[in-house]
Image: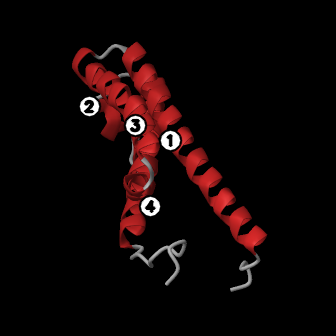
Amino acid sequence: MRESTIPPRSGARHYGLGALAVAALVLPDSAYSVVADNSAEVLIVRLLLLVGLSLLAVLPWVSQAGSDVQRRMRRWVIPGVSASAVYLISAQTLYLILGFCLLTGAALDVWATRAHVASETLRARLVRGDGDR
């Protein structure tokens, strides 16, 4: 097996994360009333859950990526989770928005990096001429 070939993985983890994402979308607003007061906060909390699930979906790839990707992920996620935790303690919407923005930035950064690595790998394979194999 070539080193550029990714070993097959079970899709059970992604199916579980997808089921959690659907559950986060279809849960009624009253389920979020424990942590959110108004409808805008409920929407942000709902989207924050989706962003968190997106980060969990890409976590295995991040653990195999280089140290620079892991370092950037930590720089985004630690303040984002901290701000979200402060929101849960203080109930100030500013921290919820800050946590949402930081975690969304982390998700965009990781997914864009993953797409870039995939495009560079494909380009290298096409230049070598073994894209048909």
Whether residue 90 is situated above or below residue 36 in the rendered picture: above
The type of residue carrying mark 1 is Ala
Pointer 2 with pointer 3, Cβ within 8 A: no
How crowded is the residue under tag 1: few (<14 C-alpha within 10 Å), some, or many (20+)? many
Residue 94 position (above or below residue 18):
above
Q: Which residue is mark 3?
A: 71
Query: Tag 2's secondary structure?
Result: helix
Other residues around mark 2 within 10 Å, as few (<14) / some (14–19) / many (≥20): few
Q: CA distance from mark 2 to mark 1?
A: 26 Å
Question: Neighbour class for label 3 at 10 Å: few (<14), some, many (≥20)?
Answer: few
Inter-mark Cα distance, 2 to 3: 33 Å
* Left or right, 39 with reference to 122: left
Q: Which residue is mark 4?
A: 18
Q: How many marks?
A: 4
Q: Of callouts 1 and 3, which one flags the residue occurring earlier in the amino acid sequence?
A: 3
Task: Identify which amino acid the numbered label 2 is placed on.
Answer: Val
Foreground label between 2 and 1: 1
Front: mark 1 or 3: 3
- Asked whether 31 or 81 is in front, the reply is 81
Q: Position of residue 104 (x, y in %)?
A: 50, 35
Calculate the distance from the C-alpha at mark 3 to the C-alpha at mark 4. Answer: 26 Å
As drawn, the label of residue 34 is: 2
Residue carrying label 1 = 107
* Mark positioned earlier in the residue sequence (4 or 2): 4
Please tell me which residue is depicted at 76% across the width and 77% down the height of the picture: 129
